[in-house]
Amino acid sequence: KMSRERTAMFAVAFALVALPTISGLITKIPTPKELYECYLYKSLNASISETPAKVIQEFCISKYIVQHMDETIYTHNITKEGVNYLNAMSRELNQEITAMEKLQKKPRHKRQAFGTWRIRKEIRTLTRQEFQALVNCFNRLKNDYSIDSSMSTYDLIGSMHTGRAARSMHNGPGFFPRHMLMMLIMETACHSPMHYWDMTMDSDMIVPTDSIMFSEEFYGNGDGIVRTGPFAHWRTPIGTPIIRNIGSGGESLAGKQGIRAMLSRRRLAEISEPQVGHAAYSVEVHHNGVHNWIDGHMARLNTAWFDPIFYGIHSFFTLIWIAFKGLQRNRGIDPQRDYPLGPNVPSGHEFFQRADFRPFLRQISNLDALADTYDRMVTYMPMPRCPSCDNSPYLVCQRQVCVSRARPRMRQNMFMFGRKKRSANVNPTPSVYGTQKPLSDSDSLADDNVDNKTINILQSSETALSTLDQPYQNTFLIDGKSDLNQWVWLNIKILFERPKGFNFHTNLPGQNNTVDMYDTSNFERIAEKIGIHNQITYKKQCSSSGSGAAKVFVQSDGLNYAGRYKDYAIVDERQPIYSSVSYIAVKKPTTAKTTKVLLTAFDTCGRSCRAACPVPGTNGNSYEPCKGAFEITSEYPLMYSTSYGGAVSAAFSVHLESKGPMYRVNNHPITFVCDHQNKWPWE
């Protein structure tokens, strides 16, 4: 709970601006117990100056939603033919395993005979012929309705990641083995190898959102509806296009130092959920960060597989798991027996639980999936290393690290730019690829010479500048459907305090030129009177745009419905304190069911803001911190608008003929304060 002194600071800060009154029709409610406990659990031993609060918030929100989601939403009624097809894929996989085990028992057997066709390479090292085979597979399965007329074969396989099955694949030690099995099923259906996407090479870019990966050469555009690339204009199972919003929302791609942090642990329990302590050791924290960095459909558990990037991501994390198991062997630990036990293992993730891809594929337990046999089925080619970076025209060696090239601004084909052109039938050079073998030791992980001081374990977003000129595209999904009529809009006010460490070089005559005129150090007493503190100095300073323009995102997550909405307000980081407005959608309440929603706000670096609510009975003259959870009813007078335009008109009027206030302050029942305090926003 906040101290009286801190509450008083809030009251003073808010007294300087006109703040809204609130009706009982939007009431604050307690943060759900499981969600609040997750916040506390994940922030233990973590520093707010190093770990963006948004990383913890997003992880816990996702976990809560998975635990409480309606399993029928996004769960498709699979026909008997669909079940038979998936079972056939499972049998084919089991036959391959049986044949491999028999081969292993033969005398003088050589290890490299295993996994002769499942050779997974980093996507930018594929020949164009190999890349086209991968693309052809996804498009063939996406356009194939011969198995089940109600869904494509691609969607049929993806349905393994929905409902109850999806719940048992996350937030526990079953994460690795169950995603591994899903990857093998897709690979079996393709009859050609999957690829992996080493996003650490994009994370090391100055602006990761500029990566060649999000061009027509590879995955297609990352801003809004996917209109370019090999998956352009794909329709999701609910009839909408695939949506991405790369770099929007405070989380970052997995980086090399984060991968090394995981590989420094000895036991699977140390990198699996539930994970207390430093979030850097949790594979699901890193995994979730990638999904949230891509955003759009990828940000939600039940819809992530709509986007083929899903398979590149999970192939990469399977690579990390195989490397982890190789290190365990070197340390004298048998990874085949290293499955967590005890009361902390979440229900459904116990070692004896079967991989719950109901109504099919129930014969493999979590412990069974740790067998070395599965590792031997797949050959992972090592991550590209300097100086050659596997001779890929899409990679460049910088600071002894292979880094992705940026996409051409005009979206020209890479081969038009005079870089080394690859023939479709060129074989890998022996010096780069060597003998094919599973990735199993730390030496296979690239870039041992990276300066750890240059890469934070959990990076703040490096894309603040690149996302300024990008709008945000919502999916408008609610309870499994895209229906605009099910959304209503709230007016949200934002108060943004200038972060520490910025200098915009705008000086007053005769004044000290080391700070600019907007810096509160020029008027510390007045700043203290206002209530500005800025106690925290972030170790990873997020870049300023130069002009001061920045985004603050506001996000709604349903607590009693399946839906997310996100938008942003533009703020001025030059100013000591700046006020802005955003309009956020939530599910429309009805007389039969109120809407319960969690609202959060954060900047593009993942620094979270605090919710503030009027003190009851003060008519909006006093404010206090609140947790951001609200219940909304359909009673009149409505405290929401049924359209976006209605929300704007509820806030403003530009009539100059004495027809009312230009700014209607009483229509902002919720405010967020981005004040950079040295405490977590949920405290």
Image (cartoon, rainbow, N blue to C red):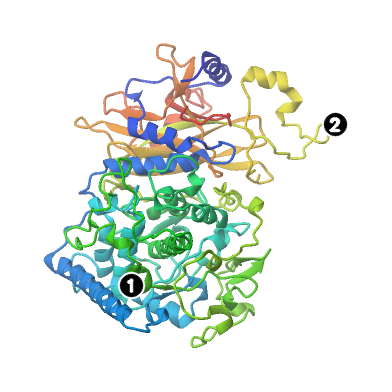
The tally of labels here is 2
Q: For the view shown, which residue lies furthest in the right direction?
A: 510
Q: Which mark is residue 509?
A: 2
Instruction: Return the x and y of residue 285 as percentages of the image width and height.
Output: 45, 48
Residue shown at the point (41%, 38%) measured from the top left: 584
The answer to whether residue 117 of the structure is visible from this angle is no
- In the shown orientation, is residue 310 left or right of residue 594? right
- Sooner in the amino-acid sequence: mark 1 or mark 2: 1
The residue wearing badge 1 is 187
Query: How many other residues sit within 10 Å of disc 1, few (<14), some (14-19) or many (≥20)?
Result: many
Front-most of 478 and 678? 678
Front-most of 159 and 193? 193
Q: Indicate the amino acid at tag 1.
A: Glu
From the image, state whether disc 1 or disc 2 is nearer to you.
1
Instruction: Return the x and y of residue 397 as percentages of the image width and height.
Output: 65, 69
Front-most of 140 and 190? 190
Label 1 vs label 2: CA separation?
A: 68 Å
Instruction: Return the x and y of residue 260 as percentages of the image width and height.
Output: 54, 56
Residue 232: quadrant of the picture: bottom left
